[in-house]
Amino acid sequence: MHQIERMSQEEQLLALRDILAGAGSSPITLEYLSLDTNSRLSMWYQLAQKMGSVIAAIPNEYTVSSQLAQFLNSLKSMDFESLVSLLSSMV
């Protein structure tokens, strides 16, 4: 986490994309892949809390696809346990 915070915004975005894609062999990607599920969830939660301050924000001009918008809206109706289970399977 601290490694990402010390990067430029452009480097942060590249590192997060690599992590999400499971691509690359950067130290940050390899470290992420070594984390257990709870640690991965915690990392994403902490990143989300710091977006726009220490971590690069999502650009204002960014628009999500209609499929992603539907998916995000479906998350709103899930109960807590189902949401945690889904997110755990995704990280």
Image (tube, helix red, strand yellow):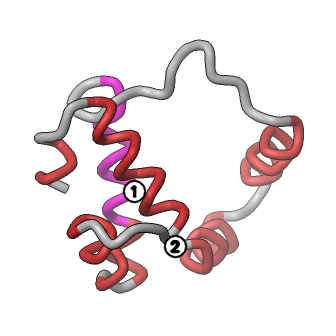
Q: Nearer the viewer, residue 48 or 55?
A: 55
Q: Which residues are magenta?
A: 42-52
Q: Is residue 52 left or right of residue 23?
A: left
- Dot 2 corresponds to which residue? 91
Is 79 placed above or below 46 here? below
Q: Residue at x 35, y 51 (%)?
A: 15
The spot of residue 7 in percent (x, y) is: 17, 39
The quarter of the picture where residue 27 lies is: bottom left
Picture coordinates of residue 71 (x, y %)?
A: 81, 50
The image's mark for residue 74 is none
Q: Which amino acid, by three-letter code, is at mark 2?
A: Val
Front in this rendered view, residue 28 or 54: 28
| Magenta residue check for 60 | no
In the rendered image, residue 68, in percent from the top left (x then y), is placed at 78, 44
Residue shown at 21%/32% (left/top)? 8
- Which residue in the structure is indicated by mark 1? 44
State the residue at coordinates (27%, 66%).
Answer: 26
Image coordinates of residue 48 in percent, x first then y, are 39, 43
Q: Residue at x 60, y 72 (%)?
A: 90
Q: Earlier in the sequence, mark 1 or mark 2?
A: 1
The secondary element bearing badge 2 is classed as: loop
**Which quarter of the picture shows residue 85?**
bottom right
Crowding at mark 2 (Cα within 10 Å: few <14, some 14-19, many 20+): some
Residue 50 sits in quarter = top left
Quarter of the rendering occupied by the N terminus: bottom left
Whether the residues at callouts 1 and 2 have beta carbons within 8 Å, the answer is yes
